[in-house]
Amino acid sequence: MEQSHKSYRPLTVLTFRWNYAIHGLQPAGYHLVNLLLHALVSLLYYRVCAMFLPEFASFVAAILFAVHPIHTEAVTGVVGRAEMLSSVFFLGALLCYARAASRRRCTDWRYVAACTVCVGVAMLCKEQGITVTAVCVVYELFVAQKRRSSTGRSWVDIWGKGGWGCACGEAARRITTVCFATLALLAARLHVMGAQLPVFTRFDNPAGAAPPPARHLTFAYLPALNAWLLTLPEALCCDWTMGTVALLKSWRDPRNLATLALATSLIAGAIHALRTRSSALSMGLALLVLPFLPASNLFFPVGFVVAERVLYMPSMGWCLIIAHGWRLLAKKRAKLAASTLIFLLLAFSAKTYVRNWDWKTEYSIFASGLKVNRNNAKLYNNVGHALEADGKYSEALEFFKTAVNVQPDDVGAHINVGRTFNHLGLYQEAEDAYVQAKSLLPKAKPGESYQARIAPNHLNVFLNLANLISKNATRLEEADMLYRQAISMRADYTQAYINRGDILIKLNRTKEAQEVYERALLYDSGNPDIYYNLGVVLLEQGKASQALAYLDKALELEPEHEQALLNSAILLQELGAADLRHLARQRLLKLLDKDATNERVHFNLGMVCMDEGDAECAERWFRAAVHLKPDFRSALFNLALLLADRRRPLEAAPFLKQLVRHHPDHVKALVLLGDIYINSVKDLDAAESCYRRILELEADNVQALHNLCVVAVERGKLAVAEECLTRAASLAPHEHYIQRHLAVVRARRAAVSPTHPKSNTPGAEVKARWNYIPQQPPDPHETDPS
């Protein structure tokens, strides 16, 4: 994957898994492990320094290392564990090699083997660990051979006439063994991760995308900047990307003097170490320079400009050199050396303490970075993200806008502005920001793969813009075009497939939606959302059995998938089998355990009880659903219908009134309420009002018209009733009950006519016929959309 940084750190990841297995995502355990690892590294570092310095000077080096402020990012930031784990085995490898080389005439190959193992483990914790091999070579050449030679023989004699049988031959064999083992480990790693270098954007490392001489001058200057941070760690920052370090565009830039000063210092130090044969200075320079080389940009570009955490290993060399210099000063001016050491330790400790507070929250760490770097749009974006997470959208918007001003071509900043406008309900402004972000994306070139040239997260602009405009039902085709454009840029962009399928369902193009979801499965066959959406599409197509299979597959991949649990439970219940209803109940109760406030779950449990004939159970669940959501349309109606069927119409009436208040167009509720007004409450005016409201909504509603006729009969307005029923009969000529009632009304009118003989039909019998109201079907289940 082009967005991969090619980091392969399985052992570091393993320790995170152990943390997670013990205490989940509680941060205290992760920080505790980091602190313990830093303490262990400091102890091992003391052991290493003791090979080159007296005891107290070694302690000075170790204590400086322990409290150095530059380590705050590595120790306090959880991901910095890679630095410390790698350092443990880095130092272990050096100690093992020193032990292997400690014998005068022969090698203890057990320690060489242990050294090789430590090199491999250090590399599996972080790539930087492999540089310990070069440090071991320096140790052999400048320390082990010097100690072994009592005649002042130079290290070049290692390859001299002594042959493999002498000490020099042993040294050559040790070096060769460790180097070949390291090359084998490096080859294995390249095989696992691929030999291709990672791809970084120009925002990650601007100098990497700059033309010469800016590229080379800036890369040459960065080691000097890192050395300055080690020496004076006052202006620390969590992010040094984007415009933090301005490019050195010409030789006249005064910062080139810093590059020259560092190069001069390192060369002078190396020459002095050779002349004086100082083990401490030689190893200090080796520990300072060699572990830094992979992050130096000198051999290949890396994904950052400066990263304080990568100075964890190089700081070992810096502390060793400082301790060596302090020891020399202490020999001449002990008081000055003591006061200097005390001042340095106090200053470092205070800065480390303050810096740890910067890392307390996401907001505080990025806000502290803005105090150091005002030209880094990423810092403004991240402060905005922290505010956005707290719901402070207006404040976040200001930081996102500043990020745009600082880096006008930052696509992500424009996306952030658009998203925040969307949160604030300023949809036109949000659309404008997304369109601006989209215009900044690189344009396709003939014959060149577009999807490899665009940051994957920048493709979110298509999703965000499409999601925004799809709120307008008249712009669904436009949203579909945006999703298709995103997919054309990145064929495996799964989320674009999912969102496009949703749009196609809204456009009633379910067959195309099915094809889109099936194509998405080619790239992400383990995504439960895709299977769920396929199930929804098949439900729309009336293919219940196939839909259930896909919903079950979604639950197989993610047993806690809430929408799949709910909709599969509804589908199981609707299939009607008793065993399937039992499974439906299990899934609904599982949802209830996850969220007892989900009114849809209560409602559908009530429907299961209805199907099982358990009216009391159904009533209990319906009442719970209405309690959670007072305007729950289906729950209110089904509860009222249940109570009416159980001959408790007066209890049903309040729920029907509540339903009509929230949903004035609910025709079935108005019919049932009118029935209760006629037969139970005897409020003809209220009943008439219900039926007239229905006829306003549906002028040809035969049932409402018929019941309005009943009201006229109850009031003794037989002529009005006859006219009303005649109209109803014309609308529904095949409804026999209307014809019967019309005949009864005509007969009754004839019975009361002065010219007609008195009817023997009792009035009570005629009146009783008007209690007929066609039974109301229940409202359907409520399902979750895709």
Image (cartoon, helix red, strand yellow):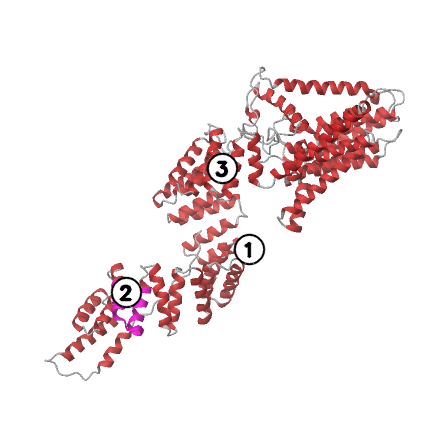
Q: In the figure, residue 314 lies in which quadrant?
A: top right
- The residues bearing labels 3 and 2 have C-alpha atoms spaced at a distance of 57 Å
Q: CA distance from mark 3 to mark 1?
A: 30 Å
Drawn side of residue 276 relative to residue 411, left or right: right
Tag 3: residue type? Arg
Q: Which residue is mark 1?
A: 559
Query: Residue 235: horizontal and vertical position, in percent?
Result: 61, 29
Disc with the residue nearer the chain's start (2 vs 1): 1
Q: Which of the 4 image quadrants contains residue 119?
A: top right
Q: Is residue 184 above or below residue 633?
A: above
Q: Secondary structure at mark 3?
A: loop
x and y percentages locating residue 312 in the rendered image: 69, 33
Q: Which mark is residue 468?
A: none
Where does the magenta region start and end?
A: 669-692
Seen as rendered, the residue at the extreme bottom is 760
Q: Position of residue 772 (x, y in %)?
A: 29, 73
Q: Is residue 204 magenta?
A: no
- Residue tagged 2: 690
Mark 2 or mark 3, which is nearer the start of the sequence?
Answer: 3
Residue 661 lies, with reference to residue 107, above or below; the image says below
Chain-order first, disc 3 or disc 1: 3
The label nearer to you, 3 versus 1, is: 1
